[in-house]
Image (tube, rainbow, N blue to C red):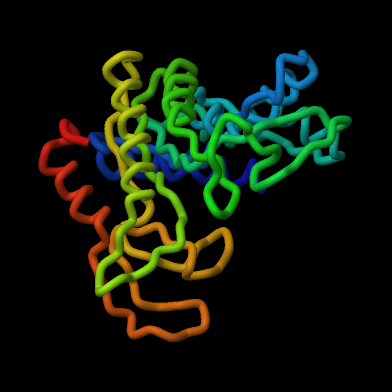
Amino acid sequence: MGYHMTLASVKAVKLIKEIDKNNKVGCVFGITPTYPKDCNPNNVMKAFKDMDRDYYQIDAMCNGKFPTYKLKEYEDFDIHLEVSQEDERAFAEGKIDFIGMNYYSSEVSKSESEEGETLWGGTQNPYLQQSKWGWAIDPVGLRYLLNYTYRKYGLPIMITENGIGAIDHMEDGKIHDDYRIEYLKAHLSEMKKAILEDHVECIGYLMWGPIDLVSATTGEMKKRYGFIYVNKHDDGSGDLSRHKKDSFYWYKHVIETQGEDL
């Protein structure tokens, strides 16, 4: 599935550029920085493999060739794919111009022989706070991921998703979500460091999502991401009315100042 999805993607890139040679085409990838539990070389090696597991598609779409190491991994599972000459041409001709990056949290990896408390994405990181759903809140992880990916491919990067799922409470018609403001402020600050101090070519930032919606990971309304509250609840109650949260006004100011005032 991964191979054919990537093959279809590079063919789409070529098609879009044939429609207009001036088109710039990117692809969105959900990638996560993964840290070793400690400096045990076995844990460092496993963390490297765990972090790199989702990069094969970026490798294929940036380098113009489906990576041989991934084909060998398929063979380890008795999956033998024939890469035709037509496929090879498609990968060579369908390279992307920029990378879309979805970032929410980092993970901690460990060797399979070790035990420990596990939450979403693996072992809990003792140096980071977690959301109510166990996702590590790691602004520096965004800077790390921007640096890692940019230095690997040298292509512009757009943050296409970033945000925190939280339980919001309405009080007198208002939603005071300082926790969301702090999350976004911290992540945008680290993104600015990546741009200004590390010279990463980050060309845009999109938050997930502006309006509350059903969470894709848990299938519930109470895990809210937006800066606009939707009056709808897991039991089906609510009139779907919209209400601006405190984060709405903060984010509006960030846009007005072009990120100068966080």
Q: Position of residue 139 (x, y in %)?
A: 43, 32
Q: What residue is drawn where x is 40% and y is 57%?
A: 225
**Residue 225 is at least partly visible in this image:** yes
Dividing the picture into quarters, in which one does residue 46 lie?
Answer: top right
Q: What residue is drawn where x is 35% and y is 38%?
A: 25
Q: Residue furthest front?
A: 172
Q: Is residue 256 above or below residue 153?
A: below
Q: Position of residue 174 (x, y in %)?
A: 26, 68
Q: What residue is drawn where x is 62% and y is 35%?
A: 107
Left or right of residue 138, residue 232 in this image: left
Looking at the picture, tell me which residue is in the foreground, 64 or 180.
180
Dividing the picture into quarters, in which one does residue 75 lie?
Answer: top right
Left or right of residue 7, residue 71 in this image: right
Q: Is residue 231 above or below residue 24?
A: below
Left or right of residue 98, residue 243 in this image: left
Q: Is residue 151 above or below residue 182?
A: above
Dividing the picture into quarters, in which one does residue 70 lie?
Answer: top right
Q: What residue is drawn where x is 28% and y is 36%?
A: 204
Q: Residue furthest left?
A: 256
Number of numbered tags placed on the structure image: 0
Looking at the picture, tell me which residue is in the foreground, 69 or 208.
208
**Residue 89 is at least partly visible in this image:** no
